[in-house]
Image (cartoon, rainbow, N blue to C red):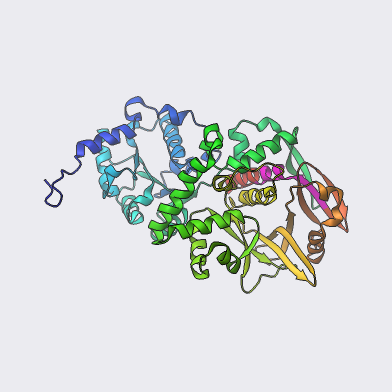
Amino acid sequence: MSKKTGLKPISQELILDRMRFENPWWVTGSIDDDYNNMQHRLYFDLFYPLVEETDVKRAVVLMGPRRVGKTVMMHHTIEKLLQNKVNRHHVCFISIDNPIYLNMGLEELFSLARRAAGTPATKGWFVFFDEIQYLKDWEVHLKVLVDSFPHTKFIVSGSAAAALRLKSAESGAGRFTDFMLPPLTFHEYIHLKKYDNLIRPGTLNWKGKNSDFFTTINIKEVNRHFIDYINFGGYPEVIFSEKMQANPGRYIKSDIVDKVLLRDLPSLYGIQDVQELNSFFTTLVYYSGSEVSLDSLSKSSGVEKNLLKKYLEYLEAAFLVRVVHRIDETAKKFQRANFYKVYLTNPSLRSALFSPLKDTDEGIGNMVETAIYSQWMHRGWFTPWYARWSVGKFQGEVDMVGLDDKNLKPVWALEIKWSNRYFEKPAELKSLLQFCNKNQLHDAIVTSVDKEGTIEHDGIILNYVPSALYAYVVGANTLEHKKSM
C-alpha cells in the first residue's frame, strides 16, 4: 500500500493488458478496420520510407497540428510493415497520453511492450510512441533509446509542432529525422474525396515557355468543392462527416482550437491568462489576410503589445498561424516590421470560430487568399512576401511575391482575386503592373473566379487562373517537389 495515499499502484498486468489492446495485430496480424478503411494521405508515400530505413540509426519525429491524421498515418505505416512481412510481434504502438502510462519512461514502456508481446528480443522492432509531448523531457528519453537499441526503429508523434521541432533540433542532432504533416492541401482534399476526374493536365505559358499546369472540365463544380475546402477542408476526419460540418464550432473548435489554446500552449509556455490568448487568436482569425500591426491588434484584442508578440510566436509554434512580412515596390525589406499580414495555416479554422462562408459573402476574398497562402506554407524551403507601398495618395499592394534566395530580387508576382472583373479590366491592376515594371518582371499571375486566359497589358503578360485551380496546382507541385528532394 502507498503510504501517501493508501492507494494501490496500477498493476503491471493491467498495463500489459492495455498494450495488448492497443496492438491487436499481435493476434490478428492486421490493424483495426477503423484505420484500414481510412484512405492514405498523399504524404504517406513521403513518410513511410523514413520508417522503413533501418540502416540509418535515427528516430522519426512525426509533427503536425491536431487532427491532421498523425495517429492514422502511424497505423497505416504499421499495416504496410505487416504487409512487408515484418514480424507482427516486433511492431508496437503506445499512446503516451493514456493516464495508465503516467510517469513511465520510454525505455520502461519498451521493456513492458516486449513482455506483453511475448518477445524478449530487442532487435528488429518498430516502436511507435503517439502524443510524445505528454512525456516530460521526451527528447532525452528518445535519444537514450536510439543509442541503447541501435537495431530498433523508433517513431514518435506530437501535436505541439514547433516545441517538438526545437527540442528535436537541440537534443536529437544526428539522432532524429523530423517530418511535418500539415493540414490537407486542396490537392489532397480533391484526391481523398475522389474528385480527381474533374482535373485534367494543362499548360500555362510562363516566361515564354509552356509549363505543365492543370485545368478542369467543370470549374463550377471545382469551385463548389473549393468553398467546401475553405470551410471544412483542413482535417481528414471532418471532410467525410456531415455531422461535423453541420456544427464546426462544436467539433473543430472544441477538438482542435480549444485544446491547443486552453491546454497545449499554456502547459508548454506557462501562459496564465488563457482567455486573453483566446481573444487574441479570435482577432487574428477575423483579420486573416489583412495587413495588421501590433498597435492595431492590441487595440482590437485588448492585449498589451509585448504580450501579443509572444502570443504570436506561440501560435506560429502551434502551426495555427503564419506571419508574412512586407517589402516595398522595389522589393526592399522594412528595417522595422511594424506592419505584416497574419494568415491562418488552414482556412477552415475560421468557420469553427464564426460561421461557414458562401461564395458571395463579404469575407470570402480574404479566405480565398488565406487558402492560397496555406498551400504555399507546406513548402518549408520557401518564404512568401507581400508588397505594399505609398506614393503620394496612391497605395500600392501585391498579394504575394517570390524573391530570389541569393539576390533577394523579385522573380514572380501573384495577385489573388475572387472576381472576374480584372479579366475584363486589366488596367485596374495598377499596383501589380507598377510593381512588375519597376522590377523588370514580364509575367504575372492573377487569380479569378472562373476565367482562364492570357492578356498582355502595359508590356506585362497577365496569366489568369481560377483561384481553386491555382490552389490545386500549388499543392500538387509541392508534393512532387518533396518527392524529388
Total marks placed: 0
- From where the camera sits, is residue 172 visible? no
Along the horizontal axis of the image, is 224 left or right of 113?
A: right
Which part of the image, by quadrant, shows the N terminus? Answer: top left
Q: Nearer the viewer, residue 377 or 5?
A: 5
Name the outermost residue toward the top. 28
Q: Is residue 166 above or below residue 216?
A: below
Q: Residue at x 61, y 30 (%)?
A: 194
Q: Is residue 2 above or below residue 125?
A: below
Q: Quadrant of residue 450?
A: top right
Q: Position of residue 420 (x, y in %)?
A: 80, 46
Q: Position of residue 207 (x, y in %)?
A: 79, 53
| Magenta stretch secondary structure, dominant | helix
Magenta-highlighted residues: 462-474
Q: Position of residue 482 (x, y in %)?
A: 58, 47
- From where the camera sits, is residue 347 visible? yes
Along the horizontal axis of the image, is 10 left or right of 80?
A: left
Q: Is residue 114 above or below residue 417?
A: above
Q: Nearer the viewer, residue 247 or 241?
A: 247
Along the horizontal axis of the image, is 161 left or right of 102?
A: right
Q: Residue at x 40, y 54 (%)?
A: 175
Q: Residue at x 48, y 59 (%)?
A: 277
Q: Nearer the viewer, residue 152 or 4?
A: 4
Q: Is residue 27 magenta?
A: no
Q: Position of residue 434 (x, y in %)?
A: 81, 63
